[in-house]
Amino acid sequence: MTSGQLRRRMTAEARRGQILDVTHAIVDAEGFHAATPNRIAGEAGINRSLIYQQFGDPAGLFVALIDREAARAGAQFAEVISETTDSGGGGGLVSSFDSVLRAVDAHPATWRLFLFPPQGAPPELHERLARAQAVVRGYLVGELLRVYPDLPDPEYTARMVQAAARELLQLRLSDPDAATHERLHALVRSFAVRADSPSR
């Protein structure tokens, strides 16, 4: 089958997905500024007019990409919460962190988009990121209060935990050889154990 035949046989939905995939690959490697219509069309093997037909303009394409990846990351986080095992104390939070690590490894480009916003990112990316952070923070507040009901300032404690977790996930993406699962798990587990220990 020739490439021309393949282009004709691809459905509109499949074509839309292909354009988003190509755009994401360019953005992940070089930033949003590199994802020009000509570049995307050339790498996708299509006429650039198809980009405008599917998304209206490059800004619409970027928003569609951001929304798709935000939905993916959100679904992965929802799955993490549903699968988290409560092993007592802070064990549930450790289990959640381990599950997020696995999600990051399975879909690194999705998580890089939000953990390392690429150069030239449109404001919609930062808006979706702020929403996602608020959701995660709400989850952390709930978990912290469940485990430590007398916690003096759950909101700010959740912010500290969130910032630390974000840093560790960034390390996993940027330096996976050093930031191994075992190393990160041991670190998070050690903090959970200390938090569970009675103060002296």
Image: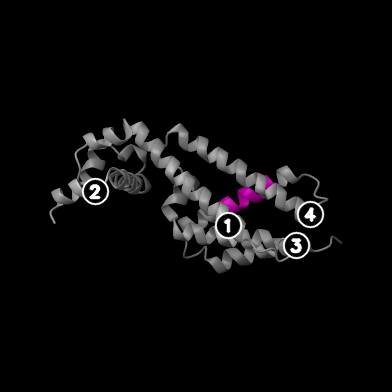
Type of amino acid under label 2: Met
Query: Exactly how many numbered labels are in the figure?
Result: 4
Q: How far apart are marks 2 and 4 (CA)?
A: 54 Å
Task: Judge by depth and name the residue closer to the eye, 141 or 165.
Answer: 141
Q: Tell me the quarter of the picture where residue 62 sits.
A: top left
Type of amino acid under label 4: Tyr
User: Is 165 positioned to the left or the right of 68 in the image?
Assistant: right
Q: Badge 2, how many Cα within 10 Å: few under 14, some, many 20+?
A: few
Percent position of residue 166, x then y: 57, 50
Q: Distance between the residues labelled 3 and 4?
A: 8 Å
Image position of 11 with respect to 52: above or below? below
Type of amino acid under label 1: Val
Q: Main secondary structure of the magenta part?
A: helix
What segment is highlighted magenta in the picture?
158-167
**Residue identified by numbered label 4:** 148
Q: How far apart are marks 4 and 1 (CA)?
A: 21 Å
Q: How far apart are marks 2 and 1 (CA)?
A: 34 Å
Q: How far apart are marks 1 and 3 (CA)?
A: 18 Å
Structure colour scheme: one colour
Instruction: Label 1, secondary structure: give it.
Output: helix
The C terminus appears in which quarter of the rendering? bottom right
The mark nearer the N terminus, 2 or 4, is 2
Residue at (62, 52) in percent of width and height: 164
The mark nearer the N terminus, 3 or 4, is 3
Image position of 80 with respect to 28: above or below? below
**Residue identified by numbered label 2:** 10
Instruction: Label 4, secondary structure: give it.
Output: loop
The mark nearer the N terminus, 3 or 2, is 2
Percent position of residue 66, x then y: 43, 41
Is residue 91 at least partly visible in the picture?
yes
Type of amino acid under label 3: Gly
**Residue identified by numbered label 3:** 89
